[in-house]
Image (spheres, helix red, strand yellow):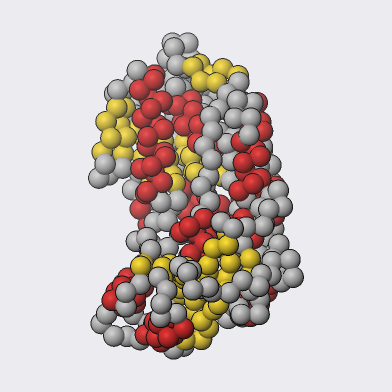
Amino acid sequence: MYEVELTHPQTKFMQLDAKFPLFVAGFGSGKSTTEVVSIIQDLSIPHYGIMKIGAYAPTYDLLKLITIPYLCEHLEEMGVGFKLNRSDFILTLENEDQIILRSLDNPSRIVGYQTFRAHIDEIDTLTEVKATEAWNKIIARNRQMIPILDSDYEPLIGEDGKQINHLNKVSAYTTPEGFRFAYNRWEKNPVEGYVKVKAATYSNPHLPSDYVDSLRATYPEGLIDAYIEGEFVNLTGMSCYPKFNRELHHSDAVVEPHDTLEVGMDFNVVHGAAGIHVYREGYPVAVDEIHGAYDTDEQISILQERYPNHAINVYPDATGSKRTSNNTTESDIAKLKAAGFNVHCDYINPPIKDRVMSYNAMIMNGVGEIRYRVNTTKCPNLTNALEQQIWGENGLPDKSAGLDHIVDGCGYFIFQKHGITKPTATTTTTHARY
């Protein structure tokens, strides 16, 4: 007997009889478990022939890191044999039913098959345009008919003489990410079939006692409603860094002879920018800036001229490993290394929202702690950017005002050294058996 403990919101969601149900959830409320158990519930419907279930995530990396391991773990607990085709991303059960795994960032692959049910993880992390495109393709694929069987295992026939089928469903599971796709479909103007269940973090009674407090200490106040309460929060037109205050966050700190410099750097022709930081009492302070440098060569020259006797760590834009700011053959990051700087850089940049959230959490977290300061006299452009940059209609920081370069550069440093790590948690309460 396969048994899973469910919270009250999870149980409510599993009992919905809606064509397009949404589980909108705070961190730790069991979103991934809800999706996997819902898939297993679908597979448990009595049927003959091959049932096909679609499972979707924003990227193939998330499918490999979260969706597939969760599915395999639960199927093993059920004692169900399965085989994963890693090249086709199809999980085939021992009865030949299939779970077809696809990425939302490549909607062109959502073709050539039909599903009975579909399950979509974190759709709100996509832009609204891409989310809409993926959603439309998924619901178009979701048309496999699975008949309701009577006690003799025969299709149930209605009074009109037609076969009665189980409801085709497309279920979505997401953390709210502003007023985007999920808000517009399920909250603003829901039409028939669009039904949501909200799950707050504390709906899970078996979380560690300090879990919610750790979220409040990690995330900026403006996103607590989204990431704990599971509420939609409108970011468009709002400040990207709403808690920054030039008086409250000012520091008189300057570079001292013994300091190791921590430099966040953005590469752009004519708009090269960098924020120079030092640590005071365990926390970073922006003490100088480079603004409007012509190219990376000029940024290197400025750092060498201003700080010839300092160890310098640089946290650059990761795209600089692939191209150069002045169209020469040597990459920007290669130039930094050749100049003798210690370069700290991942293969790709962090997600923009994760970078901004990490920066906000250092500026002021949900319990009012300030862990990042700026010498506003020495860093006027960074100060202006932190005060004035807003969220654009595309759900990303607005770039039209030209405020992005210096704050992007500093953000790479903040994320590398102080990036948010989402706490993990378990699920609980009511029992579901299959």
Residue 305 appears in the picture as rendered = yes
Residue 352 appears in the picture as rendered = no
In percent of width and height, residue 43 lies at 43, 26
Q: As drawn, which residue projects farthest toward the right?
A: 247
In percent of width and height, residue 344 lies at 38, 63
- Pick the front one: 299 or 163: 299
Which residue: 42% across, 14% down? 153
Which residue: 74% across, 70% down? 247
In percent of width and height, residue 118 lies at 47, 39
- Pick the front one: 15 or 299: 299
- Pick the front one: 5 or 239: 239
| Quarter-of-image position of residue 326 | bottom left
- Pick the front one: 227 or 38: 227
| Quarter-of-image position of residue 54 | top left
In the drawing, does residue 274 fall left or right of residue 15?
left
Which residue: 36% across, 40% down? 100
In the drawing, does residue 77 fall left or right of residue 12?
left
